[in-house]
Image: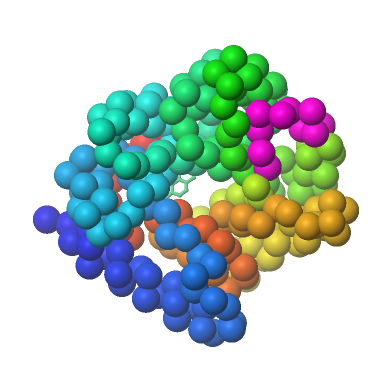
Amino acid sequence: MVDVVGNLSAARARIEAACARVGRDPGGVELLPISKTHPAALIRDALAAGHRRFGESRPQELARRAEEFAGDDVSWVAVGRVQTNKARLIAEHAAELQSLDSLGLADALERRLAGLGRRLPVLLQVNTSGEAAKAGFAPADVAAAVDALAGHDHLRIDGLMTMAARTDDEAAVRGAFAALRAVRDRLRDAHGGGFDTLSMGMSGDFETAVEEGSTCVRLGTTIFGSRPPVG
Ligand SMILES: *Cc1c(COP(=O)(O)O)cnc(C)c1O
């Protein structure tokens, strides 16, 4: 049995230690459990420990969870790649989309959300590692994307998200997180504030991310144990 409650408090302690190293308030860092592929019983353990937001990477699975937990006070955060033809599932079921990575997806979401009369908080995903396989806007394209989304009244841009490369090269990982913060700081200068959320850090690198300013760490394996590979 996976000790979800113990894992949550151990991860929280590591977040607090990382905050202490750089003089940050740990209250400014959300621990977002990523529940993809894990059994509902483990999600219930986290619910009992007070967690109310969970991340899912596939739109279909997110929609299924939303229906399965419809009677609970829980919301579902989309963190993975969303094909444009899955915009409806996100518009209907997600409380937030952290992985908005194209203007085409933004257009599809805007149409769906307008039809539903819903406003969706989003983060723009930024490819700060430069890996070709990673989704996200190039850092140099983020400002133009924000401008292009100005008329999308049903999307609320709360900040930015990134994924660092999976590598033992700590300097490269730290550099990817620092790059996201730098993009955010330029947006703040241009817009006079805003863009408060920086979603960065996963099980293998979240302490570095917190040291670099993360306000949301997305933890799967650290909380729920290992999972079968997902496509
Ligand atoms: C799966 C996933 C995570 C969590 O990964 P772990 O390494 O298991 O913590 C975080 N972010 C995204 C976008 C994911 O798809």
Position in image of residue 102 (x %, y %): 69, 30
Q: Is residue 41 left or right of residue 117?
A: left
Residue at left 26%, top 54%?
Answer: 46
**Res 40 → quadrant:** top left
Task: Give the camera-side residue of 23 and 133.
Answer: 23
Give coordinates of residue 82: x percent, y percent.
53, 28
- In this view, 209 is above or below 143: below
Picture residue at 78% right of the left edge, 44% below the top: 142
| The furthest residue to the front | 117
Asked whether residue 141 appears in the rendered view, the answer is no
**Colour scheme in use:** rainbow
Tell me which corner region of the image, top left, top right, bottom left or bottom right, holds residue 49.
bottom left
Please state the horizontal and vertical placement of residue 6, each as a whole percent of the image: 22, 67
What span is colored magenta in the figure? 148-157
**Magenta region, main secondary structure:** loop
Residue 143 appears left or right of 39 = right
The furthest residue to the right:
190
Quadrant for the C terminus in the image? top left
Residue 187 visible here: yes
Magenta run includes residue 209: no
Q: Residue at x 26, y 51 (%)?
A: 47
Q: Is residue 173 left or right of residue 12?
A: right
Quarter placement of the N terminus: bottom left
Residue 189, placed above or below residue 119: below
Q: Residue at x 61, y 40 (%)?
A: 122
Give the total number of marks visible in the rendering: 0
Q: Is residue 155 magenta?
A: yes
Q: Is residue 185 left or right of residue 8?
A: right
